[in-house]
Image: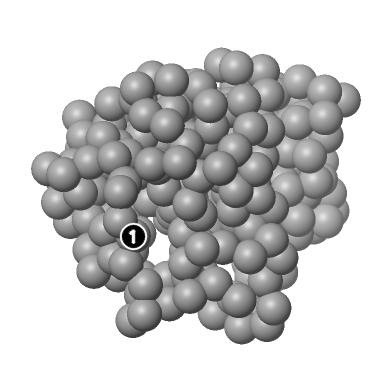
Amino acid sequence: MGKTPSNRRFENVDAVLFDMDGTLVDFFGDAERALAKAMRRHDLMPDDWETFFAGYVEAAIARYEDYAAGRITRDQMRRRRVAEALGQIGQSPAKVESVVGDYLHVLNREVTLTPGAGEVVARLATRYRLGVVTNGFLDTSTQRLERTGLIGHFEAVVVSEELGIHKPEPAVFAEALRQLGATAERSAFVGDSLEHDVAGARAIGMRAIYYRHDGKSEGPLEPQPDLIISDLRELLAVL
């Protein structure tokens, strides 16, 4: 299993790269608040919001996988995840376009940093070249990162939509390293997904730091990260 900050410190690191959604920003928290505002505006709030939103998340993940595999377009993905969620509560998909528009409007403007993200990025930027690598969309990811006030600290911002490939493909990480003028061997990647962040970083030879939060399983990890943290502020003790 990966080591914890108490017994590990990284040496010979020139660059630190971060995943965005779920690592630097609370994407699903923001998404829930944005969708709730959109649903209220159209008088579509379900009685059981928790179950409804869980269904939306399930649909969103499934439709993103379809998008990443090239089976649907970005706009189809955005519409279908909302249409499927509305279908769960017996609502007609007639208002899908309006709900999607309102949802994205709020999501792109109301951004919540994860605990410690602002402090950590600002402090690490004084010692390392920093980058962001996200499986996101140019319009949403760029606006949301700008809203955090942190974008000026990053010398590289790589959005998967722009490349046409997605994490964990090594080429996504390679593009960020190219922009930073850094090598994989002297770089570390921080992310909250074993599948997309840890696997991709390790495949290209970067050190992988797994941000395990929100009560995620304490069981065996695969692939194994080089380090496990539960709070971004722990990075300040190891970098």
Q: How far across and down, in percent of the image, does residue 30 sit?
A: 45, 52
Residue at the image position 68 percent from the left and 24 percent from the top: 165
Bin the neighbour count of mark 1 within 10 Å (Cα to Cα): few under 14, some 14-19, many 20 and up: some
Residue at the image position 56 percent from the left and 42 percent from the top: 205
Residue at the image position 22 percent from the left and 56 percent from the top: 120
- Camera-side residue of 108 and 14: 14
- In this figure, which residue is indicated by the disc labeled 1? 10
Q: Quadrant of residue 9?
A: bottom left
Dot 1 amino acid type: Phe
Q: Quadrant of the N terminus?
A: bottom right
Up the image or down, 209 lies above or below 201; here it is below
The color scheme shown is: one colour
Q: How far across and down, in percent of the image, does residue 66 sit?
A: 83, 34
Q: How far across and down, in percent of the image, does residue 98 sit?
A: 61, 29
Residue 29 can be seen in this image:
no
- Camera-side residue of 98 and 219: 219
Q: Quadrant of the C terminus?
A: bottom left
Horizontal side of residue 137 vs 53, given as left or right: left
Query: Helix, strand or loop at disc 1?
Result: loop
Residue at the image position 33 percent from the left and 81 percent from the top: 6
